[in-house]
Amino acid sequence: LLQRALRHLKWCVMFVIRLPNGNLMAPESAMDRDSRVVGDAYVEVGPADPEYARLAQQAVSEQELEARRRRWREGDEALRRQFEAFLADRKRSGQDQADKG
C-alpha cells in the first residue's frame, strides 16, 4: 500500500519539488500491514493526478530546495563553531572538572 504524504521524518524533511517540466516530485511512503513506514521515495506527479493542485501549493523549485539546503548547512556550521567555542571556554575555566566531581 502506498500513501502519498508530505512528511516530517525523525531526521529528514521531504518536500514536494516542482520540476522544470511542470510536474511535481512528491514524497510517497510505503507502509507495511501494521501501518509502519518501510520506505520513503519520490514519485513524479503530473497535472492529471487528482492531488496535483493540492501538492502544487506546497511545491518548491529545485533551486529553492538547494538554497534551503545551503542555508541549513551554513547554519549548521555556525552552530558547530559556537558549540566548540562553548566547550573550549568550559575547558579553560575548569568547569568540566567541577561538574564531574
Image: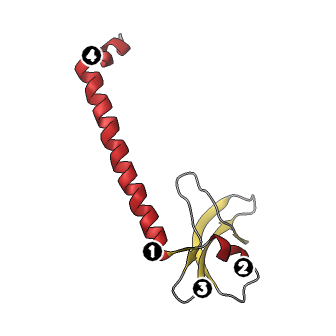
Q: What element does badge 4 sit on?
A: loop
Give me the C-alpha separation between circle 2 and circle 3. Answer: 11 Å
Quick check: 74 left or right of 51?
A: left
Give me the C-alpha separation between circle 4 and circle 2. Answer: 59 Å
Horizontal and vertical percent position of residue 31: 69, 65
Give the quarter of the figure containing the N terminus: bottom right
Quadrant for residue 4, please give it.
bottom right
Q: Residue at x 62, y 63 (%)?
A: 38
In this view, the residue farthest toward the top is 101
Give the answer, above or below, for where 88 lies relative to 3. above
Give the class, few, some or many, for how many residues have Cα within 10 Å of label 4's Cα (few <14, many ≥20).
few
| Residue holding disc 1 | 63
Q: Do tag 1 and tag 3 residues touch (Cβ < 8 Å)?
A: no
Quick check: 60 left or right of 30?
A: left
| Amino acid under disc 3 | Asn
The circle drawn on residue 94 is: 4
Horizontal and vertical percent position of residue 10: 57, 51
Quick check: 65 left or right of 92?
A: right
Give me the C-alpha separation between circle 4 and circle 3. Answer: 58 Å
Q: What element does badge 3 sit on?
A: loop
Q: Nearer the viewer, residue 1 or 73?
A: 73
